[in-house]
Amino acid sequence: MKVMGYSIEWRGNENTNKSSRQGNIPKIIVNHIVEGSASSCDSWFRSAGNNVSSAHFLVTKKGEIKQYVKIEDMAWANGLTTAAISNSKAKIVRDMKINPNLYSVSIEHEGVYLETKGELTPEQFKATVWLHKYIREYVQKKWGYLIPIDREHILGHFEIDPMRKPNCPGEEFPFETLIKVLNGGDRMNEVKEVPKWQKEALEKLVEKKVIESPEYWKEKLGESITVGEVLGIISKIVK
């Protein structure tokens, strides 16, 4: 299926795990990291030996979108026992008091936490922005409910299950930029992911005490800075 420039490739088969939503409406989108390659994830979700997990979608590093479970069905990606629900960081999970799989849509992202910390490639980021829009529109047409664009409804797996999945999808996953774009704050072609070398350079400057207020400078990554700010940094390096 091809919609607005992106193709969603159906990859679910008779072995892909799924269940009924039991009348529940999807209310949240939960982002994950694969902890492996796209091909390994694809094989696992289609394997007869997998009887524990699945997800609705996978976004590869190249920006390809694959689907394994229909949005109408429940994927096995965000399950919690009744006892574990109270430990969730997500207010909606604690309020709903039922298995989050029943009201969530799950997106896996190709990557390994120790290598990327959840950071997406530019192609992957653009594809997941489009996919979030697609899911919201699909849910609205099917159930008449529009998933809000905020951090209460666009979540990471670590917020659902902080005990077992504290690093999923990772601290570098661009939640704030994603929400900003979904809210129309930036046109897609203006969104740029901050290169890893810039982040590492910032860490070094903070470590050497060349710059102060690291939180302020983190916000400046990827943005324009004034000549005065540049001169101030150069002056400290010279000293």
Image (cartoon, grey):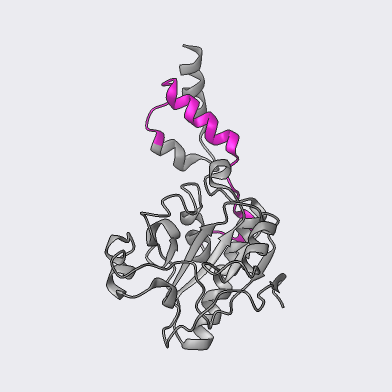
Instruction: In the rendered view, tell whether residue 162 sits above or below residue 30.
Output: above
Q: Nearer the viewer, residue 204 or 27?
A: 27
Q: Quadrant of residue 148?
A: bottom left
Q: Nearer the viewer, residue 61 or 213?
A: 61
Instruction: In the rendered view, tell whether residue 136 sits above or below residue 40.
Output: below
Answer yes or no: is residue 172 visible: yes
Horizontal and vertical percent position of residue 225: 51, 37
Q: Is residue 198 magenta?
A: yes
Q: Is residue 217 magenta?
A: no
Horizontal and vertical percent position of residue 172: 50, 47
Which residue is drawn at the image coordinates 47% and 54% (left, top)? 168
Answer yes or no: is residue 228 visible: no
Q: Quadrant of residue 92?
A: bottom left
Which residue is drawn at the image coordinates 51% and 59% (left, top)? 32
Q: Quadrant of the N terminus?
A: bottom right
Is 206 left or right of 61, judged from the image as shown? left
Instruction: Name, please, the residue furthest toward the front.
Output: 49
Is 79 left or right of 14, judged from the image as shown? left
Instruction: In the rendered view, tell whether residue 50 sits above or below residue 232.
Output: below
Instruction: Name, please, the residue furthest toward the top.
Output: 239
Horizontal and vertical percent position of residue 208: 44, 20
Instruction: In the rendered view, tell whether residue 173 sits above or below residue 239.
Output: below
* Residue segment shown in magenta: 185-214
Which residue is drawn at the image coordinates 30% and 70% (left, top)? 82
Horizontal and vertical percent position of residue 191: 59, 53
The image shows a total of numbered marks equal to 0
Which residue is drawn at the image coordinates 48% and 84% (left, top)? 20
